[in-house]
Image: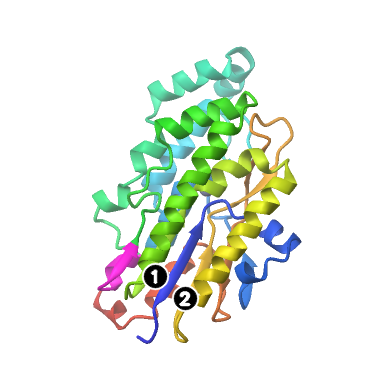
Amino acid sequence: MNGRIIILGIDGLEYNLVEEWDLKYIKQNAYTKTDLSDFKVIVTPPIWASMLTGRKVPEIEELFIKRIKFVTARSNISRTKTPWYVKLGVKILPLPIRRRLGDALTPRPMQATYDYLLRNKKYKTIFDYFDKTWTNGIPSYGRNVSNDEVRKAMKEAVKGNLKPLVEYAMKIYEQDRRALFGALDNDYELVFWYTPFLDEISHFYIGKKLKLMNIYFDLNRLVEKVSKKLDENDILYIISDHGMEPVPGSPYGGDHSDHGFFSSNTGELIGKPQELFYLVINKTERRGKF
Ligand SMILES: [Zn+2]
């Protein structure tokens, strides 16, 4: 293998906004919308798990499907049919009670699945095909994107106080950025960097375009800095799980759109997020060993 493979995983990066603001470093040499039509629910962990394994991981997705059925009757992130008793429940029960019912009937899926692929060796991941790899944690591979602090901040944001959420998200972004540049100074064969902050913040900023634009511009500058650290043969992929779009009537203001983003400095493109896995392992001689 020649150069390193660097993957920047930016949770919630919206294709349409990269296009609208013409962010050339993020777009790289070739870019596209990803196709999420295989997924019954457009939520974070199952999509990242599919990139890591090359296929859907039903054990992860099922927990989210079950949860969404109990808590929400209508949502743009779900393609599942809502049973009649949930429709009735939505009419007569307030959301906090539906959430409590959901908790009793299904575990919190974010917490239940955050390290699923590390615990369950049934699935080979992208990291098994290289000797020297690095990640700062990816949903389903050691990253819990739903801790008490972020849940509390989200609750405040729904009430109209965005400050704790913005502060929390920017703190995580800063930590993740520092970790990335540390990793780039080492000679890993595969670097899979991940940051969740944009998903969290875009739910609320999707209706505040100027604020969101500043953040997208900053991400564009981050990619510029990363590309300057690359050697000639290094490969850079940028990928998101899904995007974000305004949803009138949503308590957040916005919700996940049904496409993600992908770009490469090589000109290569993928259709579905799970194809990232094959794109990457086809670059190593070890692929024949499994
Ligand atoms: Zn996400």
Q: Which residues are magenta?
A: 126-134
The image quarter containing residue 203 is top right
Residue 162 is situated, as x and y percent measured from the top left of the image, at 61, 32
Residue 38 lies, with reference to residue 187, above or below; the image says above
Q: Earlier in the sequence, mark 2 or mark 1?
A: 1
Residue 129 lies in magenta, yes or no? yes
Residue at which label 1 appears: 184
Q: Nearer the viewer, residue 16 or 171?
A: 171
Residue located at (49% from left, 39% from top): 168
Residue at which label 2 appears: 229
Residue 226 is situated, as x and y percent measured from the top left of the image, at 50, 70
The answer to whether one can see residue 77 in this image is no
Q: Say if disc 1 is inside 8 Å of ligand 1.
A: no
Residue 246 lies in magenta, yes or no? no
| Secondary structure under the numbered disc 1 in the rendered image | helix
Residue 78 is situated, as x and y percent measured from the top left of the image, at 58, 40
Residue 143 lies, with reference to residue 151, above or below; the image says below
In-image side of 162 versus 2 (left or right):
right
Q: What amino acid is found at the position of numbered circle 1 in the picture?
A: Leu
The image quarter containing residue 233 is bottom left
The answer to whether one can see residue 107 in this image is yes
In-image side of 194 versus 84 (left or right):
left
The reply to whether callout 2 and callout 1 are in contact (CB within 8 Å) is: yes
Q: What amino acid is found at the position of numbered circle 2 in the picture?
A: Lys
Residue located at (52% from left, 45% from top): 170
Residue located at (63% from left, 52% from top): 215
Quadrant of the image containing the C terminus: bottom left
Which labelled disc corresponds to residue 52?
A: none
Q: Nearer the viewer, residue 285 or 9?
A: 9
The image quarter containing residue 267 is bottom right
- The local crowd at label 1, few if under 14, some if 14 to 19, many if 20 or more residues have their Cα within 10 Å, is some
In-image side of 184 versus 256 (left or right):
left
